[in-house]
Image: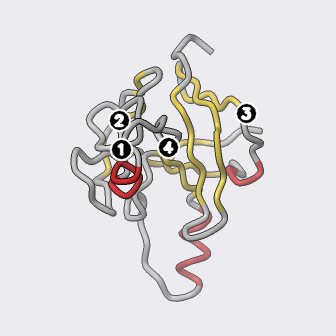
Amino acid sequence: MRGMVVAVSRSPTHTLQKPNAASIRLVAGLGVEGDAHLGKTVQHRSRVARDPSQPNLRQIHLIHAELFDELQASGFEIAAGQMGENITTSGLDLLALPADARLHLGDAAIRIVRSSRYPPPSTSALCAPCTPC
């Protein structure tokens, strides 16, 4: 399955929207450098409040650009980064990727840990050891 990355985003603070960046750096075992969700343990505020020692299973957030087309057809104007994703893809069925699938992005690989169909439909991943693909 081949697709492409159409946008990358990060935010150093816990905000819904993440500004687009020219590039991002994936850090093995942690996530996106400079993003509020970077870390080995959970970074989402609601989960930190429950148990800050939980492993961070949402180091990287991915959304497919085709979702934006669907939302625009319903009257919503949504752009890359506005739903908090780190990586926006096109031509890749993220929701069909099985858990533990490895997705290669340039010279890095990420491991898919969870797909969600509830709002918004998205995929979460762990930053696998970044080795040449």
Q: Which mark is residue 43?
A: 1
Q: In front: 80, or 46?
A: 46
Q: Is residue 25 above or below residue 90?
A: above
Amino acid carrying mark 1 in the image: Gln
Q: Would you say the residues marked 2 and 1 are in contact, meaning their CB atoms lie under 8 Å apart?
A: yes
- Please indicate whether residue 102 sits to the left or right of residue 86 in the image: right
Sequence order check, earlier mark of 3 and 4: 4
Q: Is residue 129 above or below residue 69?
A: above
Using the numbered discs, state the Cα–Cα distance from disc 4 to disc 1 in whole angstroms: 8 Å
Q: Is residue 97 above or below residue 24?
A: below
Q: Which mark is residue 68?
A: none
Q: Would you say the residues marked 3 and 2 are in contact, meaning their CB atoms lie under 8 Å apart?
A: no
- Label 2 belongs to which residue? 38
- Label 3 belongs to which residue? 101
Amino acid carrying mark 3 in the image: Ala
Q: Which mark is residue 58?
A: 4
Using the numbered discs, state the Cα–Cα distance from disc 3 to disc 4 in whole angstroms: 15 Å
Amino acid carrying mark 4 in the image: Arg
- Please indicate whether residue 77 sits to the left or right of residue 121 in the image: left
Sequence order check, earlier mark of 3 and 1: 1
The answer to which quarter of the image holds residue 113 is top right
The answer to which quarter of the image holds residue 32 is top left
